[in-house]
Image (cartoon, helix red, strand yellow):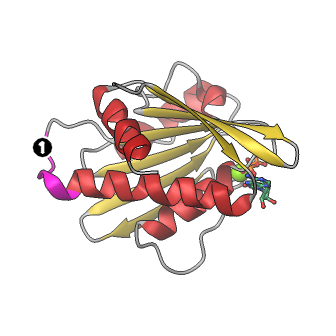
Amino acid sequence: MTTHHLKLNLQDETATERLAQKLASTILQDHASAPVQSDQAAAVIHLSGDLGAGKTTFARAFLRQCGVTGRIKSPTFALLEAYNVSSLNFYHIDFYRFSDPREWADAGFRDLFQPDSVVLIEWPEKADGTLPTADVLIQLDDHDPGRIAVLEARTPRGTRWLNKLQTNP
Ligand SMILES: Nc1ncnc2c1ncn2[C@@H]1O[C@H](COP(=O)(O)OP(=O)(O)OP(=O)(O)O)[C@@H](O)[C@H]1O
Ligand SMILES: [Mg+2]
């Protein structure tokens, strides 16, 4: 069966981190199994949910799993943190303080979306209409004491990732 949608119960912070690690491994495997094509779109994950929902927690665990070492800062103030691991560029963006969509063009954000880029975006709704299509949207919501995560694929590649996640829990 094809999975476009996954709903998961994340009981604690560790569960959020495990989900992030699994998605990261899936995406890395994808990249390892086929050479990056010059016309390929960047891998894009949108992270939505209220303040404190766990978006940065997810992004940190994802980046660690991808091989990022050293401190992983929340991009809340800088808007963007960039990392390079072997042949891939990772961008962690937080649009919480973003107010004018024109800032998007002025800051040159479009240039980040290269075939060898993996882009994680917190608060994507604040830059609505200016972002390229996400492969997967992740919505995190409070579900005392943990969180509920809803993952939705928006591209064939995103669907493939969710299928792998589901068959490899
Ligand atoms: N599944 C979970 N269950 C309970 N607590 C969690 C879970 N996942 C993460 N947390 C906790 O929730 C808090 C989330 O903080 P985090 O900075 O990741 O949120 P955020 O969504 O990035 O917020 P912001 O919108 O302010 O950037 C952390 O204290 C983390 O330990
Ligand atoms: Mg955050």
Left or right: 132, with 127 as reference point? left
Residue that badge 1 annotates: 37
Residue 59 location, quadrant: bottom right
Q: Outermost residue toward the top?
A: 129
In the image, the segment drawn in magenta is 32-38
Q: Residues within 10 Å of mark 1 (few under 14, many from 20)?
A: few
Q: Residue 49, how many percent across, how many down?
A: 72, 36
Mark 1, ligand 2, within 8 Å: the answer is no
Q: What x and y, as percent, mark residue 137? A: 53, 32
Q: Residue at x 87, y 49 (%)?
A: 145
Amino acid type of disc 1?
Answer: Gln
Residue 156: % across, % down: 29, 27
Residue 35 within the magenta-colored segment of the rendering: yes
Q: Nearer the viewer, residue 114 or 155?
A: 155
Above or below — where is 129 with respect to 90?
Answer: above
* Residue drawn at the location 64% of the way across and 26% of the way down: 125
87 vs 149, left or right, is left
Residue 128 lies in quadrant: top right
SS of the residue under disc 1:
loop
Where is residue 70? Give x, y as percent: 54, 81
